Amino acid sequence: MLDRILAKSLQGEVVSPEEIAFLFEFPLFSEESAKIIAASRRKSERASDGLAEVHAQVGLNIAPCPKNCAFCAFAAVNKVFERASELSVGEAVAAARQFELDGANAIYVMATADYPFAKYIELSQEIRSNLQPETVLVANVGDFDRKEAEQLRDAGYSGIYHAVRLGEGRVTSLSVEQRLRTLHNAREAGLIVGTCVEPVGSEHRIEELVEKTVISRECSPRFSGAARRIPIPGTELARHGIVSEARMAHILAVVRLAVGYDVPGNCTHEPNGIGAAAGANLLWAESGSNPRDTEEKTEQQRGMTVQDCASVFREGEWRVLQGPSRLYSK
């Protein structure tokens, strides 16, 4: 049965939810898991012409966010950051330009979910005007309506990163329906969508991994993938510990096999070699604020550089794309 499902996926046929669950069930380091990871790598290479991408994210602000996503360092309930701070316009522009100079294939601009949308648009326009015309910009913000999606497009964004997270509605104050509406609004406005099955914790059952994998497939993204939850010390979810990079390699491989060749990208985060070897062809560098970090400037702790990510890919035997992202290309 395993060989049949792998052949089906590699031939570009749709893998059913029951088949996805079957792939998730194999023990790590089993022969079957090795076959799944090998097939994932093969499919990723075919889908992306053997090219990996390094994207980079600028975190604009830190604030005790009222959305209270339990896995996030910004959540007011987690009391990690109890005072608000943000980059100045000049600092945000400088960070984006540095990532451009470093060779990032796309630059994301991230803000907390309660960041004023009009302010985000104004700052985005300033960033856009200071970058090369071909540099790809991606928005990573809270939920938005159709009109706001059009504003993002008009501000110079090629697309968005957005996800229906694991535990959505249970460990967040947001609903699955709200997140799906945002994805729909983005597509209707002509924005390209990138997404992920995240943040994976040890307590998440196969049923929910399958559910979120299918959701990621059905939102017509240019990349999907899987990322683990980084425990924020002292928070309720920290008691579950962290999923190993080895386990995540199996999970991201299953997600890769569950989506079609029309989804060329397969991401994982944070960057790691075993994930790249297993078929992840998208990694992120980071500066500024970071929802997985307790430092205000993540480049001083968790955040990796563009060069760091490119090195991970080289160790994973990937060629890194030079120039603007193909994942966010129309």
Image: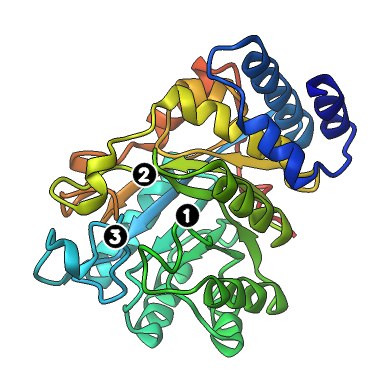
Q: Residue at x 58, y 35 (%)?
A: 252
Point out the tag, 3 or 2, that comes first from the N-terminus. Answer: 3
Q: Residues within 10 Å of mark 1 (few under 14, many from 20)?
A: many
Q: Residue furthest left?
A: 83
Tags 3 and 2 touching, CB below 8 Å: no
Tags 1 and 2 touching, CB below 8 Å: yes
- The circle drawn on residue 166 is 1
**Residue that badge 3 annotates:** 70
Relative depth, front residue between 22 and 190: 22
Q: Nearer the viewer, mark 1 or mark 2?
A: 1
Give the x, y percent position of residue 242: 32, 35
**Residue that badge 2 annotates:** 229
Label 1, label 2: how far apart the Cα atoms are:
10 Å
Which quadrant: the C terminus? Answer: bottom right
Q: Looking at the image, can residue 54 be seen?
A: yes
Point out the tag, 3 or 1, that comes first from the N-terminus. Answer: 3
**Element class at badge 1:** loop
Relative depth, front residue between 203 and 109: 203
Amino acid at dot 1: Leu
Q: Looking at the image, can residue 328 be seen?
A: no
